Image: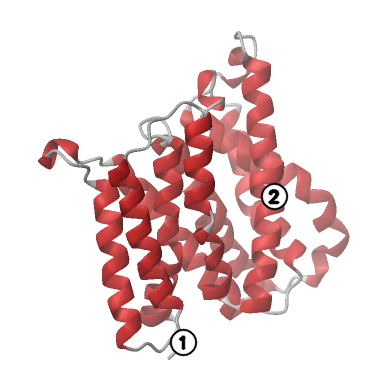
Amino acid sequence: MKKGLVVFSATQIAALRMGLAWVVTLPFLLPRFREIKNKEWLILLSVGLFGNGIPAFLFAYAQTKLDSSLTGMLNSLVPILTMVFGLLLFGLRTWTLQVIGLVIGFIGALMLIVMPGGISGFQPEALLVVFASACYAFNLNMVRKFLPTMPSMLITSGSFLWVGPLCIIYLFSTDFLQRLDYEHALQSFSAIAILAIVGTTLAVLMFNRLIQSGGALFASMVTYIVPVVAILWGVLDGEQVSGWSVLGVLIILAGVHLVQKPQ
């Protein structure tokens, strides 16, 4: 996303990402289209919006204001938010230690959103990443509860069918074609293509498989790794990662650890 922003706008990046993911997965959907029941299409609409479309636009815009490392760190909230939605909407049971973990996790997130320096350190764009993480968490519960036996490729391709065509229509209503003539356009387009194929299509496919095999909370545990990877990429790209940020993400992960502990 950061490389794509050199040439394209945030909304163009999100639309291109979703559009390319749809194009890549469409050949896998067409031969098996009839396997999806009518009522399952509504669930796939939810997966398309909350698991893919809405977060793509939120992350792309947040990336115009925040470092890659910070957006990745805030992703570590997904397991905690997964449990929150599970408790409130999906009948998940909890116990005291998990509640303590929730509180600790939100304290860590608050540290990342409000950096040292009082109210002047408040980063409102970080709330977009929190909301995107909430979308992922809601989607985790939806896939686990309503699509437990659907093949992961059908979930992935069926959900992109809802958002991909609309994103392509929007993309070509902008100055996207003109920007293809800009300097560095090929590099930016290539970066978004890699994001769409590897970081979106392949990642979503594996993630849906994880949800079905191990459950929503188990799948959300991949976010243990996201902050570490995000920090490393940020450092390699010349971003400054403060000790305050590292402390915040460690506190979040401590909360996640308590949330994941068995009773």
The residue tagged 1 is 262
Q: Which coloring applies here?
A: secondary structure
Q: Earlier in the sequence, mark 2 or mark 1?
A: 2
Asked whether the viewer can see residue 58, the reply is no
Apparent side of residue 18 relative to residue 73 in the rendered image (left or right)? right
Residue 10 appears at what percent x and percent y? 47, 31
Apparent side of residue 226 relative to residue 252 in the rendered image (left or right)? right
Residue type, mark 1 in image? Pro
Quadrant for the C terminus in the image? bottom left
The residue tagged 2 is 201
Residue type, mark 2 in image? Thr
Q: Quadrant of residue 45?
A: bottom right
Q: Nearer the viewer, residue 171 or 52?
A: 52
Residue 108 appears at what percent x and percent y? 29, 58
Mark 2 vs mark 1, foreground winner is: 1
Badge 1 element: loop
Q: Is residue 159 above or below residue 72?
A: below
Quadrant for the N terminus in the image? top right
Q: Is residue 244 above or below residue 79?
A: above
Q: Is residue 216 above or below residue 207?
A: below
Q: Quadrant of residue 259?
A: bottom left
Q: Residue furthest front?
A: 243
What residue do we see at 62% from left, 72% from top?
211
Q: Nearer the viewer, residue 9 or 167?
A: 9
Residue 128 appears at what percent x and percent y? 35, 47
Asked whether the viewer can see residue 118, the reply is yes
